[in-house]
Amino acid sequence: MLTSPPVPPPTPSTVWLARGRHTGPAAPDVLRKNLRSLKDDATIQDFLEVPDEDTAEGELTFEARWLLPTDVTVRARLTLTQWSGRGQEWTLVAESERPWDLRGPSPAAMFWPWDEDTPWGHETVTGQRYLDINPLPADDKELRRTLRQALRDTWTVHVLVHEAMTPDERGRRSLVPLLPPGLHHRVVEHRAAPHQLRTVNWALRDFDVELPRGGALVLPGSPAPEAYEAGDFSVRSVFLDGTHPTELLDAVTRYAALPKPLPEGGEAALTALREQWQLLTLEEELARERRLVKMYAEALEAMTQSRDLYREAAEQAHEALAAYREAAEAGARPQPQPKPGGFPFPQLGRTLERLRESAKGLRPALPTGGGSADQNPAEQDRPGQDRPEQNKPVQNSTKQDGTELDGTGGGPGTAADR
């Protein structure tokens, strides 16, 4: 039977997620140096490099904590994977004590330094750069592949801008830095040349969206959020002459605020942040120890109750086993068999036996000469009574030869001769 894949949980409003790739060879050193500098400047409260024994093989994990201007604490955890041919991928998850305020600093800027040619600011799916314009490939096949990858990415917001005409120097600047700081490393801007509009819309037709000429479109992603409507997140005109694109910035901000499920791998990263966090203050350590003591006390109480229940069940089982053995032994002993024809009450039985013997003594003896063989035995056993045959009148019958027979048919003569 086919089963649908499990739906990931929604992204909490207090969580900030981002993923990227560092293309240089010294990513760990860059992180250590920048975190130390930010701590010295009091930009962050503290940071920690998690020991190797507490991380997966080949990974490095850094934790940092800082305080927002609104006195809200933010905890962030960055995981750096092992070096590959394209660099080292990083995953960053941050959680605030209150719903995330995009006007606050980007958590990525709390770990990485930002330079014009910084190697860490590359998005992992399409390889495009954050805070920069990314022209679509000139080759149609590569263009379609880039758009398909952008549409399937669940970590980053992809914005597609069409250049109605070749822009000047002011139009070649990225529009992402105009967004709130909390979106600087979650949005990638793609640029389509004037002659690429038809090819772009041909690649987008399967997703029921279209890029307006000279406008912009926030790609829906896959799967698209439930509240996504293409008309609400497309802009008819974007002037690339230095004008502030208010309509486009509003569309990107509204899309980023839509409820979306956690991206692939995001649930594991969030769980690690919440359950494996090690950068604790003294108050947090004390609270954790108290929670551990409470948890151990509850576990001990549960074990004690379980022991008592087990002991009671064992005693009941022993009692049942003893009763079973006694019943088995009683069934194995020979039982006295009742006498055949005996009476259930011994005294009454003996009385009836004596009466039976007395009745036998009073019974007259049967004549030897014969009597009717078919007489009733009950009538013979009754003492002191005459047989009915003696009281019957004698009926004479005559044989064929003239001989007279008595009424009983027992031979010649009368009853007195017998």
Image (spheres, rainbow, N blue to C red):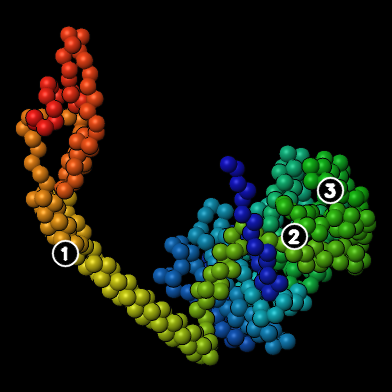
Q: Left or right of 418: which side holds 157?
A: right
The disc placed on residue 347 is 1
- Which numbered disc, 3 or 1, marks the residue that appears first in the sequence? 3
Whether 119 is drawn above or below 373: the answer is below
Asked where in the image residue 118 lies, by quadrant, the reply is bottom right
Looking at the rendered image, the quarter that the N terminus falls into is top right
- Which numbered disc, 1 or 2, marks the residue that appears first in the sequence? 2
Q: Neighbour class for label 2 at 10 Å: few (<14), some, many (≥20)?
A: many
Q: Mark 1–mark 2 contact, CB under 8 Å?
A: no
The disc placed on residue 39 is none
Q: Which dot, 1 or 2, sits closer to the camera?
A: 1
Q: Secondary structure at mark 1?
A: helix
Q: Which dot, 3 or 2, sits closer to the camera?
A: 3
Q: Amino acid at mark 2?
A: Val
Asked where in the image residue 258 lies, by quadrant, the reply is bottom right
Residue displayed at 36% across by 80% down: 304
Looking at the rendered image, the quarter that the C terminus falls into is top left
Q: Amino acid at mark 3?
A: Val
Q: Left or right of 149: which side holds 219?
A: right
Q: Position of residue 291 (x, y in %)?
A: 49, 84
Residue displayed at 93% across by 55% down: 236
Q: Left or right of 208: which side holds 44?
A: left
Residue displayed at 16% across by 44% down: 381
Q: CA distance from mark 3 to mark 2?
A: 15 Å
The disc placed on residue 209 is 3
Q: Secondary structure at mark 2?
A: strand
